[in-house]
Amino acid sequence: MDTTFNDCGANEVSTMTTLVIDLDGTLIDCNSFTEFVKHLFAQLPEARLNIFSIVLLRKLRLITHLEAKRRIVTIAQKHLQKVNIEKFIDKLSTHLRSSLQRRIDAADRVILATAAPEIYVIPLARRLGINEVTATPPDGAENRGTVKLRNVEKAGVTFDRDTVVITDHYDDLPLFQRNTAGHNILINPSSTTLMHLKMAGISFTVEN
């Protein structure tokens, strides 16, 4: 799903530096959803049993990651107050890679493209001064792989020589494959991710 906070002038994207950036393991040095589950467990004692049950079902692979995510988000929507979301954003902000914040500040257009749920991604983006987000909605497809690419393209990104894609994981291979004219950057990638991109013949640079 694409969420735009204001009119970013998509028709001018070809003359602008466009940054498409992932969240988990990229813009921040942790898994935001794992941290969100911990935050919920601490903030919502009345929901701890439900949260624990969902985590256990996922650990036993009796439900998918997406289903677990949906159930956790449903609990958060029901019980969590706005102030609790802001507290969580405060925590996530401590995991921000400062070098990438500088890239965000320097870009003409920035899209935060992540599989993490909208419930905290959208307020986090606002906090960081990012005007556009594609994230996983409460109901609907997980925003990863080809779904993420489709949503980024729906936002008007044309992937020209001024487009920069930054991620840490081969899940974003479709974005890299589409961005052949632009610049692809991997942040602290695993050996598996490096292998996948090299096998796909993707041109990229690595940053830690």
Image (cartoon, rainbow, N blue to C red):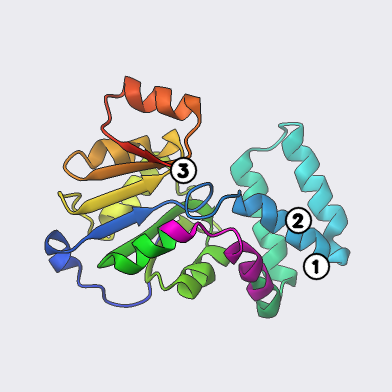
Query: Given the image, on which type of amino acid does mark 1 rest?
Result: Gln
**Can residue 183 be seen at all in this image of the molecule?**
yes
The residue located at (12%, 63%) in the rendering is 15
Under tag 2, what secondary structure? helix
* 48 or 207, nearer to the observer: 207
Under tag 1, what secondary structure? helix
The residue located at (83%, 49%) in the rendering is 52
Quarter location, residue 63: top right
- Cα–Cα span, label 3 and label 2: 26 Å
* 102 or 49, nearer to the observer: 102
Checking the image for residue 208, the label placed there is 3
Query: Given the image, on which type of amino acid does mark 3 rest?
Result: Asn
- Cα–Cα span, label 2 and label 1: 9 Å
Q: Earlier in the sequence, mark 2 or mark 1?
A: 2
Q: Give the percent coordinates (x, y) of residue 163.
A: 22, 52
Under tag 3, what secondary structure? loop
* 162 or 79, nearer to the observer: 162
Q: Give the percent coordinates (x, y) of residue 43.
A: 80, 67
> Which residue occupies the extreme top position in the image?
199
- Please say if 30 is above or below 84: above
Q: Give the percent coordinates (x, y) of residue 133.
A: 41, 63
Label 1 or label 3, whichever lies nearer to me, is 3
Checking the image for residue 43, the label placed there is 1
Residue position for label 2 = 38
Magenta extent: 86-99
